[in-house]
Image (cartoon, coloured by chain):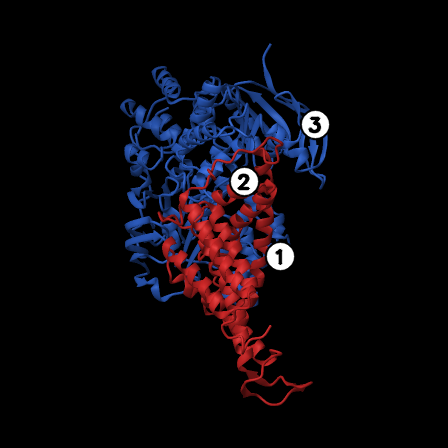
Chain colours: A blue, B red
Amino acid sequence: MTDVIADIQNLTFAYPDGVEALKDIRLQVSRGEIVAVMGANGAGKTTLCRHLTGIIPHVHQGTTQGKVVVAGMDVYEHPVHELAQKVSFVTQDPEGQLVNPDVLMEVAFGPENLGLPRDEIMRRAKWALQAVGLDGYESRSPMELSGGQKQRLALAAGLSMRPELLVLDEPTSQLDPIGTTEVFEVLGDLRKRYNMTTILTTHAAEDVPSFADRAVVVSKGKMVALGTPREIFAQVDLLDEVGVQVPQLAAIGHRIAPQQPPPLTIEESKKQILNLIQEKKLTPRKANPPRQPMSQGEVVLECVDLTFNYAGYPPVTALRDVNLKVHKGEMIGIVGQNGSGKTTLVKQFLKLLIPTKGKVLFKGRDIKGFTTGELATSIGLVLQNPDEQLFTISCKDEVEFGLRNLKLPEDEIKIRVDEALGFVGLEEQKEFFPFRLSFGDRRSLTVAAVIAMRPEVVIMDEPTTAQDYLGRHRIAKLAKKLNAAGHTVIMITHDMNLVTQYADRTVVMGNGEILLDGPTEKVFTEVETLKKTFIKPPPVSLLARELEPYGIPGDTLTVDSLVDSLKGGS
Amino acid sequence: MATLEYIRKDTAVHSLQASSKLLLTVASLAVSLFALDFVLLGAWIVFLLAWWVVAGIDIRRLGIIMKVLIGTYLFLIILQGFTYRFGSTELFRLGVLMIGPRNYAAYTLEGFLWGTLIFMRVLAVVFSLPILTMTTPMTKIAANMGQMKLPYQFTLIFVTGIRFVPLVFQTWNNVLQAQKLRGRDIDKLPLYKKAGVYTSVLTPVLLYLLQISTTLQTALECRAFGSPTTRTYLEETKLRGGDYIAQISTVALAASVIGLKVMGYSSIGYVIRM
């Protein structure tokens, strides 16, 4: 008989406001399994996690039907601290989870509460920090870490509890690509060494086949699919319908041979394509059509020998002699590992941080003489966390705020508010209190508030964090639309699929320096340099390079262009 | 707050246990309460500044603290100068405001000295705080509180409270930043308008912190906080030679100055009467 560690029986749950978050969920997870839960934002993934850990009903209440038994304990009958000895939960917001003054203490906190011996606590803490790549950070304050590093730390704190069941709610949403893969590798290692079971929610569809035994798809509170990754990713139409990303390789397989099982690895995909070429069902084209050349227009922003140190004992150098020119009308993607200096760089453009050395020029003028408020009328920056950028009582007021600072006439303000809210699809929510909107819509609202001011340059810092597949593409399309309307757009992101699809130029940062800068298709051929800063090209790019000897253009970056080039002669 | 945050250094004070420095804080409180005298308080303040030097605390921070407290000092000497009930040596008068036998429009030397003395009392406590907070990681403080058998819930509230202070400041700054990014030129606004800006910042800060505190509760519970198991403290709290020296010298000096006061010592007793 299989050893079931989590048994969800006909679970239906509604929050006190009446919103039915889960509907008749039935799921059994065996000991040692790794199960990925996928679904669009608001599908019910987090609510499911809360049930598995007893947070519902002990912290959040609502109306429940059904039963959840975890590690032999009915979650309704056992308090959270009791369940915590068997189940560990890492939530998606690292900021609120870190309570201790230094990294080591943070990781030791859980084992200390369990009353474990000191040497065992130290062993676990060291192991957990090593597992997430934070060894050497023991005495750092969690407050000093970057967003991605905080997420790693939250994960390490969960790991150090060495639970029987690990429940992770989007544990990699703020991590760089290789960091994400490493976390998933750690889960595999935990299973191998401790037979640990993991249930995690994720939007990282590309990685799911490599680590998950099974995947669950939820939509509007219902479980709409359950199976192995191959079974799940074969259901492309269903996934499209519920807003779940199909991995690029499976998407290519579906486009060129829909009747065959989806390929999930580069090897499988390559084999499938070569077979189809051999069978003359595909005829590759030799070269991609020329891409839009990089803009060489007027330089709007320029960094000259820019160095920045964060104060501290000792100071931390976040930027080292950075030289960069941004031309009018460019669409630039900035990528790099957590803590590589991306956010620090764009904050210099608006004097939110003052350079330690070097200077920033806006249209040839040193920004030293301007205030942030003055610069903001020409350079719009949308920061990472929307909740720290919304401060009025309605969406309309939020967009109006900047326009009033520009002292525009009332009729112009009205036109721009309608236009900006329409641009991000929030015209119907004009009078809504911003905090009533979903996370994705709150982020869109911050974009609307910035673009209404019609800045020449729009900078978006990690606009796709914690967004589902559709949300990510909606934001990226919005950025492209702005670019097409004449704005210069700079986008910081960890989503390589988006960068390769939307950015004409890519800047790669690592350790406070610019490692690569050039046309996106060229940058993503520098695999070894990318690896240095924890970036890996999207699977389609790696596949194209594998297929180059067989006539596929090696600089292909998107599913569409690869399929086009495969069907080039057919 | 940066004035009081822990700074990692390798000094004799840093290597002491938190309990030795907690004792110094408690002793400072006792001295300020029971040794109200210029010389006695002055001696204690000098003693604290000696700790500062040994702890390698940048003495320029004194200036920052004084800048924050200068308003309090001005308030005290103005208030006491005009209202001190034993004031008799008039330095100047703004007019006549007789209430009973006392002219409350007259500023007296005794009132000025009394205000200064109360301010010294404040300094005797405030100067002891950086010695604790800037040389002791919060982990050590928490472990010592545990050793003192304080309920762990109390310790955690204390530690997370300290943890939330920079978070409040950080969120506050981020919201202000967001307003600047929408063209609000806060730096150039007159003071009365800045006050309006700060009010509008308060709402999102509170909403955000509320949201974070729910996450925090979840995180704590999920890490077995509140478990009936006896908690282990990672930090060693055993006293060493340096701790004994520090604790004995602290207790000896505090007992001496309080003892002198109790025995009737007064440096300028003819001026100041209780």
What is the chain letter for disc 1? A
Q: Residues within 10 Å of mark 1 (few under 14, many from 20)?
A: some
Give the camera-side residue of B41 and A368.
Answer: B41
Which residue extends farthest bottom?
Answer: B95
Q: Residue A238 placed where, x, y %?
A: 56, 27
Q: Residue A435 placed where, x, y %?
A: 61, 50
Q: Residue A256 placed where, x, y %?
A: 43, 23
> Disc 2 and disc 3: Cα gap in Å?
33 Å
Disc 2 marks a residue whose amino acid type is: Gln
Q: Is residue B135 above or below residue A45?
A: below
- Residue bearing the label numbered 2: B147
Disc 1 marks a residue whose amino acid type is: Ile
Q: Is residue A15 above or below residue A322?
A: above
Query: Is there CB contact under 8 Å for labels 3 and 1?
Result: no
Residue at 34 percent of width and 62 percent of height: A367
Q: Is residue A23 above or below residue A270?
A: below
What is the chain letter for disc 2? B
Residue at 34 percent of width and 28 percent of height: A542
For the N terminus of chain A, give its image quadrant: top right
Give the camera-side residue of B5 and A255.
Answer: B5
Residue at 55 percent of width and 46 percent of height: B160
What is the chain letter for disc 3? A
Disc 3 marks a residue whose amino acid type is: Glu
Report the disc number at residue A393. 1
User: Would you say residue A386 is visible in this rendering?
Assistant: no
Report the disc number at residue A77. 3
